[in-house]
Amino acid sequence: MNASDLCNAYLDALNRSDLEAVQAMFPANGTVVSPLYGEQNAHDFYANLFADTSRSDTTLLNVFSTSEDGSSVALHFKYNWTLASGKLVSFECVDVFVLTEDRKQFQKLTIIYDTAPLREDFEKLKT
């Protein structure tokens, strides 16, 4: 599976809220850096994200190779995120992935988006 296939499989698993499939895309020591959740182990991050989510719907806008050696890739997509509370928030984001050495999994994900429009609703989930 090449990086583009891995990215498409990632968005598909995210849309299906398939925790096992998303976690399988990261090694046990994989990490995610998120504007809302901070830095976490990837497997823990997705368990937390899916607990806070009733539905995810993504629309891929662009895929960018971010390094000459092919060790990283970035996805630009629209994310329609329905929180567990039922509140729908929509935003564009960029996910920057560093691939494992064998290029079969994601070692690290850095998520980039403006949290201002949804921070209040997200904080309500955590209280």
Image (tube, helix red, strand yellow):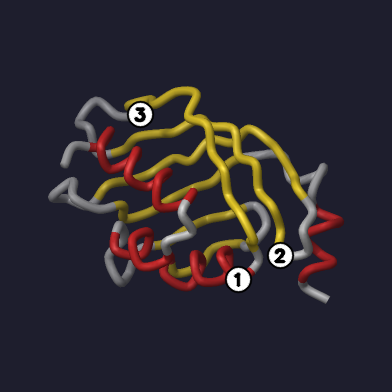
Q: From the viewer's perspective, tell me whether residue 43 is left or right of residue 4.
A: right
Q: CA distance from mark 2 to mark 3?
A: 33 Å
> Label 2 sits on what residue type?
Ala
Q: Which mark is residue 84?
A: 2
Q: Quadrant of the C terminus?
A: bottom right
Q: Which residue is found at the position 51% from the left and 71% from the top?
A: 47
Give the residue displayed 30% in from the left and 71% down from the top. 28
Q: Quadrant of residue 8?
A: top left
* Secondary element at image label 3: loop
Residue placed under numbered mark 3 in the picture: 66
| Secondary structure at numbered mark 2 | loop
Q: Is residue 115 left or right of residue 81?
A: right
Q: Who's the residue at 61% across and 62% down the image? A: 38
Are dots 1 and 3 in contact, CB under 8 Å?
A: no
**In the image, residue 87 above or below residue 59:** below
**Label 1 or label 2, whichever comes before in sequence order:** 1
Residue identified by numbered label 1: 51
Tell me residue 22's x, y (percent): 37, 59
Is 53 rendered above or below residue 41? above
Determine crowd level at label 2: few under 14, some 14-19, many 20+ residues with C-alpha closer than 10 A: some
Identity of the amino acid at label 1?
Ala
Single out the mark in the foreground, 2 or 3: 2
Q: How many marks?
A: 3
Quarter the N terminus occupies? top left
Q: Earlier in the sequence, mark 2 or mark 3?
A: 3
Residues under numbered marks 1 and 2 in contact, where contact means CB atoms less than 8 Å apart: yes
Is the residue under label 3 in contact with that under label 2 (CB below 8 Å)?
Answer: no
